[in-house]
Image: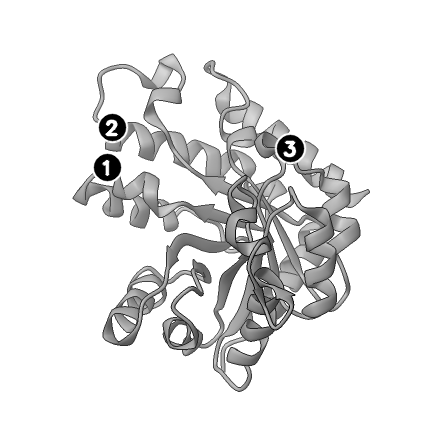
């Protein structure tokens, strides 16, 4: 039987002493001039992300490729993504930020593509269609399906906070349902919880004391690393703190990889305090 996602994550975090997840959101227009040399966009993305992975891996325990940025490259984009996944070292996990969520065969094939074909350790899903849209992902042993609960964007309040179920804000209802959906399944459920709402992070940790949290929103979106760890970090519930733009684009010069490594190191250190 495969070790659970949580146990593998906790082991890596203990060994490397880091909760950093580096988001791979490659935007060719933002690449430094050294990569703006007329090469194909796919080649530029491959070179950029390869350098980022190599430079930041010592300070990270996970990488989170955002599928939108690779799918925008056309059919070759998924080939590039597949190639990059092979470069992630064994002491880092991979979370596929695909935000899938569909029923029946569609959900089964989405899950198979992410877990069986690409071999991801975790992915993100939308719970809006209910239990049968999340269930296919939870069938995969040793994986974690991070359910969108209280996200980091400004529009999160439109539904996640404003709507209630039996008097409970929607994001807390989602957390409670995710715990129920994952009982007795081969895989685990986790929650996506934005660093921009530390009060919600604390509430959700109370609601789901053992579920893994994937926390975006530090760095460019303004979330505070210390507030995240204070609200979410416990011995029982592992936390992955994701940063994308603040690491990827720490420099627009030829030293972009070195600057990314420094940004990842500083975030690692900030999360330790």
**Residue 53 horizontal/vertical position (percent):** 47, 39
Give the quadrant of residue 268: top right
Where 202 sits versus 179, above or below?
above
- Residue 134 shown left or right of residue 225 in the figure: left
Label 2: which secondary element: helix
Q: Nearer the viewer, mark 1 or mark 3?
A: 3
Give the quadrant of residue 43: top left
In the rendered image, is residue 91 in sight? no
Identify the residue under disc 1: 73
2 or 3: tag closer to the N-terminus: 2
Using the image, tell me which numbered label, if any, was put on residue 41.
Answer: 2
**Residue 26 horizontal/vertical position (percent):** 38, 33
Q: Nearer the viewer, residue 156 or 249?
A: 156
Q: Nearer the viewer, mark 2 or mark 3?
A: 3
Disc 2/disc 3 C-alpha distance (Å):
30 Å
Disc 2/disc 1 C-alpha distance (Å):
7 Å
């Amino acid at each position: 039987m495969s070790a659970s996602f949580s146990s593998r994550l906790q082991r890596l975090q203990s060994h490397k002493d880091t909760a950093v997840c580096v988001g791979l959101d490659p935007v060719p227009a933002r690449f430094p001039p050294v990569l703006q040399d007329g090469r194909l966009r796919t080649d530029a993305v491959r070179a950029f992300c390869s350098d980022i992975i190599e430079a930041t891996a010592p300070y990270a325990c996970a990488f989170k490729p955002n599928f939108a940025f690779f799918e925008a490259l056309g059919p070759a984009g998924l080939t590039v993504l597949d190639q990059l996944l092979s470069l992630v070292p064994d002491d880092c996990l991979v979370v596929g930020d695909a935000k899938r969520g569909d029923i029946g065969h569609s959900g089964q094939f989405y899950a198979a593509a992410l877990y069986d074909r690409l071999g991801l350790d975790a992915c993100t899903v939308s719970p809006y269609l209910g239990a049968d849209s999340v269930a296919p992902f939870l069938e995969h042993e040793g994986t974690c399906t991070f359910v969108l609960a209280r996200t980091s964007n400004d529009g999160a309040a439109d539904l996640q906070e404003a709507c209630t179920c039996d008097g409970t804000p929607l994001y807390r209802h989602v957390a409670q349902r995710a715990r129920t959906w994952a009982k007795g399944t081969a895989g685990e459920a986790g929650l996506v919880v934005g660093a921009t709402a530390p009060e919600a992070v604390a509430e959700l940790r109370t609601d789901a004391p053992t579920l893994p949290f994937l926390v975006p929103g530090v760095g460019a979106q303004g979330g505070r690393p210390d507030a995240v760890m204070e609200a979410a970090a416990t011995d029982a519930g592992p936390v992955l703190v994701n940063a994308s733009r603040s690491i990827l684009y720490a420099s627009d010069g030829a030293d972009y990889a070195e600057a990314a490594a420094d940004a990842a190191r500083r975030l690692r250190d900030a999360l330790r305090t």
